[in-house]
Image (tube, rainbow, N blue to C red):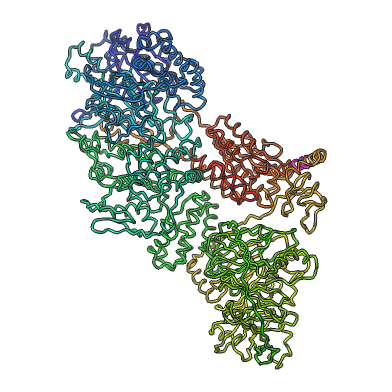
Amino acid sequence: MQKDLLGQDVFLIGPPGPLRRSIAMQYLELTKREVEYVALSRDTTETDLKQRREIRSGTAFYIDQCAVRAATKGRVLVLEGLEKAERNVLPVLNNLLENREMQLEDGRFLMSAERYDKLLQDHTTEELDSRKIVRVSEDFRVIALGLPVPKYKGNPLDPPLRSRFQARDVYYLPFKDQLELLYTAGPNVAAERVSQLLSLATTLCSQESSDLGLPDFPVDNLLPALHVLNAFPTLSSQQLVQRLYPYDSILGKDGRAAVEGVLSRFELLDGRRPPAPSAITSVSRATGLEGHADVSLRVADKDVTFQVPAGVKETRPPNSSLAFISTPSHSQLMAEMMQSHMVKDICLIGAKGCGKSVIATEFAAMLGYSIEPLMLYQDMTARDLLQQRFTLPNGDTAWRPSPLVTAAMEGKLLLLDGIHRVNLGTLAVLSRLLHDRELDLYDGTRLLRWDRYQTLKEQLQCSDEQLKERSVLPIHPSFRVLALAEPPVVGAGAGSRGQQQWLGPELLTMFLYHTVTPMAMGEEMDLIQGLTCDVPKEAAQQLLHLTHSLRKTNDPTVQSLASSLSTRQLLRICRRLSRYPEESIAHAVNKACLSRFLPSLARASLDKSLADCSMQDTRDPSEHLRDLSCSVKDGVLTIGNVSAPVHSATEKMKVPDVLFYDNPQHMMVMEDMLKDFLLGEHLLLVGNQGVGKNKIVDRFLHLLNRPREYLQLHRDTTVQTLTLQPSVRDGIIMYEDSPLVKAVKLGHILVIDEADKAPTNVTCILKTLVESGEMILADGRRILSDPREAEGRPNVVVMHPDFRMLVLANRPGFPFLGNDFFGALGDIFSCHAVDNPKPQAELAMLKQYGPDVPDATLQKLVAAFGDLRSMADRGTITYPYSTREVVNVVKHLQKFPEEGLANVVRNVFDFDAYNKDMREVVIEALHKHGIPIGAKPSSVNLAKELPLPEVQITGYWTINQAGNARRKLLCPTETRPIDVKGPVFLRVQSYPCSRQESRALSFSEEKAHWQIPMDEVNIICDVATKDDELYVATCNPVSLYSMKERGDAVRCMELYDVFPRTISGVWQPLVTVAPLGSPLDGQAVLHEEQSNTVLHLDMQTGAVRRLALSPDTDQSSTKASSWWSSKEPQGAHKMCHDFAHENWLLFYKEEGNQLEVLDVLEGRVHSISLPINLKSVHLVAEDRWLLLESKTNQKFLLTKPMHMSAEEAGVCQLHSIGEDSASSGHGAASAEVPPPQMLSCEQLPNENLSAALDQKIVSPNRILADSGSFARVVVGFPDLVSPNEVYSFKRPVDLSLVKGADSGAHALLRGGLRSSPAKRDNCVGLLSANQVVRALPPSKVPLREIYPKDVTPPMTAAYLEVTDLSSKKVKYIPVPRSMTVSPYTSWLSKVSESDVLMAALGSGGVVTVDMGGHVRLWETGSDTLQRSLMEWRNMIGSGDGRPVQITIQRDSGLDVTAPKHGKVDANNDPHVGGNQWAGGTGGRDTAGLGGKGGPYRLDAGHKVHQVSQAEKDAVPEEVRRAAREMGEKAFKEKLKEIDMSEYDASTYERFSNAVRRQVRSLRVVLDSLQAKGKERQWLKNQALGELDDAKIIDGLTGEKAIYKRRGELDPEQGSPQQKPKRLRVLVDVSGSMYRFNGVDGRLERSMEAVCMVMEALEGYEHRFKYDVVGHSGDGYDIELVRADKVPKNNKDRLKVLKNMHAHSQFCMSGDFTLEGTDASIKELAREEADEHFVVVLSDANLERYGIRPERFAQVLTSDPQVNAFAIFIGSLGDQAERLQKTLPAGRSFVAMDTKQIPQILQQIFTSTMLSSA
C-alpha cells in the first residue's frame, strides 16, 4: 500500500505456491483496481507484452497487449513467473518501469503523465495525437511475482531490471495464522493432528532441509488436504503426506530416510496402517447440487458418502466395464483418487505401461466425465497449451482455443499425459488455472471461476452474451485436471540421460499426487486371465515369475529390462500366446526386450534370468529350417502356418511392389509379423542398416495387398510436420494432410521409416494415437477412433478400422546414435528384431541375385561378412556390415564377372581405408576367408619344380608258392571277445577355430591354416584324417583334437586322467590315432605304443572305453617300472590303421611274433601266431599283408581268408618273397634294398600307372616309398603270381645316410644327437594325383638347387617333397616354422625327424601339423593347383596397377624380463626342489615359482609345482622375515631402476600395440558420444534462420521473429553441472598373477588392460575421473594411478605397468580381492560423480584362500550407486566358470583366453558408461 502511494513498482518474492498471487489479487480487489495479468513462460516474446499484429480484412493492425493496455488505461500489471522468461525479453519493460516511457511498434510513444501534462500546457491534444504521443496513466503500477532464483530453477533477474523494483519477501503465513486457518477448515480433525501436519510442513520448508536437497513442502496444499481429513477422520496422516509430498518417488535413499525421520518426530508415521478406504461402493448423481455426484466409500466396514464434482454424462457404477478388470490395489487407488478429487486436481505417477491411462479412463467414466486427452511433448509452447492462431476464410487472423480451454469451458476431465516431458516454464502458465481456476488468454479473453463469474454477472447486471462480448467466460464448475507422469528419476542430476527431476517445488503445489504401484503377482495374474481368457495358465505364470524377479533387483541394467516388460507388454504377449499357444515364452520375452540388440551385459543378464526361471528358448534347429513358404490362394495369404485374408484395395497404385527373394529367415519374421498384425497390433521393426526392413515391410504389404503411406522422419521433424503441412494460399492458411492423416482417414498402412532419427518428443505423439486412438491436429480437427463419439461433432476425422502403423528403426545405441525410439515407445508396439539372414538363408538369397557367380565366391563372402558382423556385435568394430552390402557386391559380380572379387569388395570397405585399425581388422577378416584384397595377380609363390631321374626297372619280387613245406607256412589263429572297461565320460571341450585362408595375399600350395588350442609344453605325436575330419593326438598330456576341414570349431578331449603322467619327463608316451568308419563315425581308437593301451573314444559324447586286447596286458603295466630302468630299448607296440574305415585294426609288437586283429564292431580279437619275428607290417590289401622279418629284412606275404568267422578258425598262409635285382639275375643285391617306409593299400588308377611308366599298361600295382628312392611302383603285386616288376625313381643319395641332426631349424634346441630313429616316417602316397609326398627336415633337401645362390633359404620347419609321377617332377614346398616349440626337445626328436607330422587328406592334398600345433592344409596335385590358380586370378581380376602392401604384426610371446638370482642352468632343464637353481619349481629358498620361502617368484617356463598355503605358512618366522627383507630390498632396487631407466620405448610399445585396436575403437565411441552431447537444438523466435511453421501466421501479420535456427542450447538455468563419471580399475597384482603368467600370460594381459584404460581415457579427464588400484597379499589399496595425477605420457604409463609387474613379483602371497572390492565400492560411493564404476580384475583363485563366491557376489552388488564388474582370468580347472555361475549376471566375466580382457573391458565401457552419456 505504501509503495502504491509512492508510485513504486513492487516485486513479491517468495517460495512457490499461489500465496503471493492471491495476496496481490486480494489487495487489488480491496482497492477496486483493474488488473492485467500475464503469466510469463519461456515462450513469451516482446509481442506478447507490447503489441501484436492481427489482420483484419486484409490489413494488418496493431493490437495493444497487456503492458500497453495497463499503461494507457491505468491498470495494474501483474507479471507472474519472472524467472521463467528468457533473458532478453523483459528489458523491453525497463524504460516503462523507470520513466513510464515506451516506444511502440506502430509509431506511438508512451509518455509519463507528468511530462504529458506539461506538454499539454503548450500544445493541444490533437497535436499530441498527431505526433502519436500517448499518456501513461498515473494509476499504472507493476506487481511482479517471482521465485528467488539461486534456490529454485530459472533465470536470475537482470540487474537493471532488479533495480527498478522494490522487493518484499512473502514467506508462508506465520505458523499461528496458518493453524487458525486450518482449524476452521477441518473442524472434525483433532487439533494436535493439524499442528503436527503443519509442523512437518514448516520443517520441510526450512533452510536445513533444502540443503539436504529436499524440495519444499507444498504448504498451501494443506488446506485442501484438511478438507479430505475432515471428511475421513480415520485416514492415516502418513498417506496424506504421501499425497502432498510423494517422497518415495522423488527422493533417493538418504532423502527418504530424512523425511521419515521428520515424520516420526511429529508422530505421523503409521505403526500399523489403519485400514484405508478399500473400495468405492456406489456412484450416483447428486440430488441437491448440480454437476456433482454422491460417492460412497467403504472405509473399515462403514460407508462414508461425500460429494465430488462430476461430468455431464451419466455416472456409472464401479466395476461395470468389461475392459477394466478391478484388482484390490487399483480399487484402493480409485477410492483414494475420489477423496482427492473432492478438493483438488490429481496427478498419477507410474511407470510406463502400468495402466495409468486405463485407470484414468475408468475414473472418468465412473463420474460421467468426457475426457479431453492432451499429449504433452517436450518442445510444447504455452501457445500450444492455450490458444493457437489460425486464419478465417477471408484471411483474417484469429485465435483458436486449444482443447485445454474448451475442456475448461465445457467441464470435461482434462488428461495431461506426460507432464514429466514438458518444460517447467511452460507448465507454469497453468498454475493459475489449477490454483484459482482463472485464465487470461492471448486474445484478451478471460476465463473466470464459476462463482466469481456469477458474482460478476450480478454486480454488473449483464447477461452471458454481454459478458461474452467483453470476452469474459466462465470455467465450468466440474472441470478437473488429471495429470499422468512417469516417476522422476531418483537422484538424477541434469546430466544423466537428459531427464530432469521434473517434480520440483512448483509442481508440488499444483496437484495432489497418487502413485500407481506395480501390481502384485496375483493381481497381475487375475488381470491377464480376465483380459485374455484362454491364455495357457502355466505360461502366464512363468512369464509373471520372470517379470517380477526382474523388477525386484536393484541392478540398473536389469531394471531397464523390466521396464520393457510392463503390464502392457505382458498383456500383448499373453494375447498372442492365447492365439498361438505353441509359441515359446522365451521367444516372446526376447522379442519384447529386443534382446538381439541389447548391450552384451544386459543380454547376458536377461539370458541368466530366463535360465533361472527355466525358460530357455527351446526352438529345435529343425524349426529354423522348416519350409516357410508364402502363397496366396482364393484371397487368402498363408505364410508358414499363419493365414490371413487378402485386402481388396481400392487404390492399387499405393500397394508396394518390390523385388523380393524369399529366404527362410525373412519368412519367419513375416510370419511373426502376420501373427501380430492379425491380433490388431501396430508393429515396430528394429534392425541394423541394410538388413532388409523396408523390403520385408513392402513385401508384407504387397502380399496382404494393403495400400501404404510412407513417412520418413529426420532430425528436424516436428510434431506439426508429422500431422499437417501448413501453406498460404491467397493470404489464407491451408493445411495439407500429411501421410499420417491420410492413412488414418483412408485406412491405409502407415510406414514410418527411420523413426529413431526424429527427436523422441516428436514421436511421442504417436502414443495417444496408438493407445486411445485420439489425436488433435494443428488445424483444430481431431482424430477419433470411436465412430459413436464422433457423431454430431464438428471437425472430426474418424479413424478407419483398417489403419495400422508399421514403424522401422535402427537399433538403439552406438554407432547409429539415433534417439531411443524403442525406449520411449517400445511398449506400445509389438517389436520385431530383424537380423541379417543366417548363412544358409543369405547364401540362397545371394544365389538369386547372382545366379552366375561361382558358389565358392558366395560362400567366402557370406563367411567373411558373418565374421565381421559378429565382430560388430562384440564391439570390436563399430560399423555393422549388412546384407545390403553383400547384395551390392554380388550384383556387381553378376554384371561384370571378369572384374575380380577383391576389387568389388573394395567398394564396401574403402570407407574404412583411412582408419588404420579398422582397415586392418577388415582386411584380416577378408583374408581369413580367402578374399584376396590387396593381392597382385603376379604374386604367385609356387615351389620350383626339379626333374625326376629316369624310371628304371630295379628288380623283381617273386612270391613263392611251390609245394615246398619250408616255404609255405601255415599260421594258426584264435579268436576271443575283447574285454571292455568303461565307459568313462570325459568332457569334450569345444574351442573356436580361427581358420585362416592362406591364399589371401599370394597364391601358394598352402590352402588354409589354423592353430590348435594347446599348451606350449604339449607335443603333437600323430595326425590322421577321415573324409573331412582331422584328428590330432598329443602326448604331453595325452589328448585328442578333432576338427572339420572347413569347420569353425576344434573339439578337444583331455585324457590326462587315463594316462597319468608318471614322473615328468621320464615316461614319454607316444600315441597313434585311428578314426573309425561308418557306422562308428566320429569315433576313434587311440593306441599308446609303450604301454600298449588301446582306447576307444567317442568325440560326440565324450565316452572313453578301454579295450584290453590280450589277457596279459595287465602285467605289462607292472613291468613298466622296469623297462625304463633297463637301458636297452624295448620293442614298441604298433598299430596299423590303413583299414580303420572298415573298423578293423591290426596290432603287433616289434620283435614279437603275434598279430592281433581287432574287429571293433563285433568286439572280437583274432590272434595270429607267426613263425618269424616281426620288424614291420604293411597292409597291402584287406586279405594280403606284407611282413618284414626283423634282423634279415626278409619279406613275407601273409594271405588270410577274407571273412574270419569264429566257427572255422581260418588258417593263414605265409609266403616268402624272393627279391632279385634287375642287373644280376638272382638274390645278389637283395641286401642293399632299404625297408619300405610306405606301401599303398590300393592301386594307382590305370591312366596314372601308364603315365608314370610311360607305357600303356593295365595291371594290379602298389606304390612304395623308401629312403633310397623317390618312389617305386611294384607292378602286379600282390595279386599276380608271376614275378612282379619293381620300377624305381632312384635318389642320388639315400636319405638315411644324410646327416640330419645338427642342421635342423631347431638344432640348437634339439640338444645333442638323436638317440633313436624317429617314430613317424611322414610319407604318404596320393594315388589320385599320382604323387608321393613326404616331409623332410631342411637338412635333407637340396636347398642349393631350389634357391639361387645369393638367397638365404627361409627358416622352415620342414619341406614337403612332392614327387609327381605324371609330370616326372619333384618339388619342395617349404612349411613355415612353428611359433612355439615345446621345451621337451629330446622327446620331440623321437616323434619325427622334421618338425611336422603329415597325413593325406580325404579331399586330395595333405595336412601337416607342426610341433607348435599349427595345422596347414596343402594342395599338391598339379591339376587342382591349376584350377585353383585360375579361380584365384579371377577373384583378383585384372589388377589396376595399385600396389597395396599390408604387413600384419603378430604379438610375440616374450615375457617381461625380470632379475634372476641363483645359478642359471644353461640347458634350462626343469629343476624341482634341490634349493640351488634359479627358476626352479618347488624349491625352498631360491627364486622360483611355487616354492616355500624364496624371496620372490622367478618364472623359467616349467610346469608349476604348487606348495599349499598351509605349508607356506609353516616356514619359520625368521626365515620368512629374512626372505621378506631380501624381497623388499630387491623391490626397492628394482623401483630405483625403473625411475632411472631410460624411457624404454619398445617395452611400452609392446603393451600399447596389443590393445591399440581396442583403444582406438573406445575413443571413437567416446568421440561420437561427445559429439552427440553437443548436438545443436532448435532455437525458436529468431529473427533469421528458416521459417518456423508454427509461426506462419505471425509471418503473415508482419512479425519479425518467426524463424528458427539450430544453435547450441545453453544448459538450463539452475540445472546442476555435469559431473564426470568415476571409474576405478582394481587389478590383481598378487603373487599368483606372476606365478601363472607363464601359463596364460595373465599378468601381461592385466597390464595391457590397464594400459588400455590409461590410453583410452587420455584427454577425456573432464568426462571420466579414473584411478587404478592394485591388491595383493601385501594389502588391498596399492596405489598405481591416482585420480588427480593420471599419467600424461608414455613414460609415466610405462612406470605404472612396471610397478605392477614388480609388485606382483615381490609381494607376499595372499588374496585381498574381497576387501579391495569392498573398500573401493565404499570409497567411490562417497565421492560426488555422475556415475560410479568399479572394475575388478582378478584370477579366480578365491577358493584357495577360502573366500566364498556368494560373499563376493554380495560385495559386488552392495551399493546400487556403484556399478561393479568382475573379470576373472581363467584359472586352474573350471574355477572361474563355477564362480561366474554364482555371481550376478552381466556383472562377471570369465576370460579363459587372457586376450579377451581388453575386449571385455571395452564391452563394459560401451554398454554401461556410454548408454547414459
Q: Quadrant of the N terminus?
A: top left
Q: Which image quadrant is residue 300 in?
A: top left
Tell whether 1063 sits left or right of 487. right
Residue closer to the observer: 1771 or 1678: 1771
Q: Position of residue 472 (x, y in %)?
A: 23, 19
- Residue 18: % across, % down: 36, 17
Judge whether 1660 appears above or below 963 on screen.
Answer: above
Q: Is residue 119 left or right of residue 836?
A: left
Residue 1536 inside the magenta-drawn segment: yes
Q: For residue 46, what is the image quadrant? A: top left
Residue at the extreme bottom:
1225
Is 890 rendered above or below residue 605?
below
Q: Main secondary structure of the magenta part?
A: helix
Pick whichever, 1769 or 549, lies toward us: 549
| Residue 1204 visible in the snapshot | yes
Q: Is residue 65 visible?
A: no
x and y, in percent, of residue 117 in the image: 28, 9
The residue nearer to you, when weighing 786 against 747, is 786
Residue extent of the magenta highlight: 1528-1537
Q: Position of residue 564 (x, y in %)?
A: 42, 40
Q: Residue 1446 vs residue 408: left or right?
A: right
As for residue 467 lying within the magenta part, the answer is no
